[in-house]
Every structure is written in structure tokens, then in C-alpha cells.
Image (tube, helix red, strand yellow):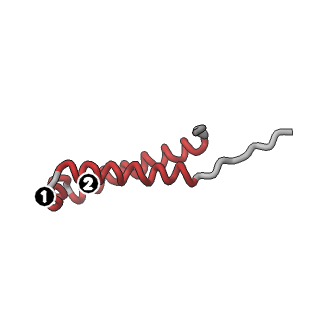
Amino acid sequence: MKFKKRKIKYAAIFFICWFVLLVFLVDGVLTFQTMVDYFGSYALVEIVLLLLVILPTWAAYKYTKEQKIKRQ
């Protein structure tokens, strides 16, 4: 699999924005300990939060179209 610079750039930007939003929500609004108490497992909450960051980032990479540069 060959990585494309443009796709990586957009996926990285998406990753940073999404990660910041989740950190704000989890640490500020929802509080992590409340989520652990609700779900009952620290590991489960950590895995779900990691998947909430990794899967959308992978999708952004997968569905970003690479521009074709036409050289003359």
C-alpha cells in the first residue's frame, strides 16, 4: 500500500481536530471517571475512545481523493 502525502495531510488534520474535540468532551464535559462508573470498565472506555479517534481518521484517509497532477 503506497501512502499519499495529500491523503495523510488531511487525515492528520482530521485526527488532530477530532482528538481535541474528544479530549474536551471527555475531560471537560463528561468527565472520564463518570464514563468509567457508567460503563464499569476502565479498559472498555479507553478502547472505545481510541476507536472513536482511529476509525474516523482511517475513514478520512480512505475516502480523501488524491489530486492527479497533469504535467506537460
Residue at the front extreme? 1
| Residue visible at 73% across and 46% down in the picture | 68
Name the residue tied to disc 1. Answer: 37
In the image, what residue type sits under mark 2? Answer: Val
| Residue visible at 36% across and 49% down in the picture | 20
Q: Which numbered disc, 1 or 2, marks the residue closer to the eye?
A: 1
In the image, what residue type sits under mark 1? Answer: Asp
Count of marks overlaid on the render: 2
| Residue visible at 58% across and 45% down in the picture | 7
State which quadrant residue 31 falls in. bottom left
Q: Position of residue 14 (x, y in %)?
A: 47, 50
> In front here: 25 or 59?
59
Residue 16 as seen in the image, left or right of residue 30: right
| SS at mark 2 in the image | helix
Q: Position of residue 63 (x, y in %)?
A: 57, 54
Residue 24 as seen in the image, left or right of residue 54: left
Name the residue tied to disc 2. Answer: 26
Residue at the right extreme? 72
The image quadrant where one finds the C terminus is top right
Q: Which mark is residue 14?
A: none
Q: Position of residue 8 (x, y in %)?
A: 54, 42
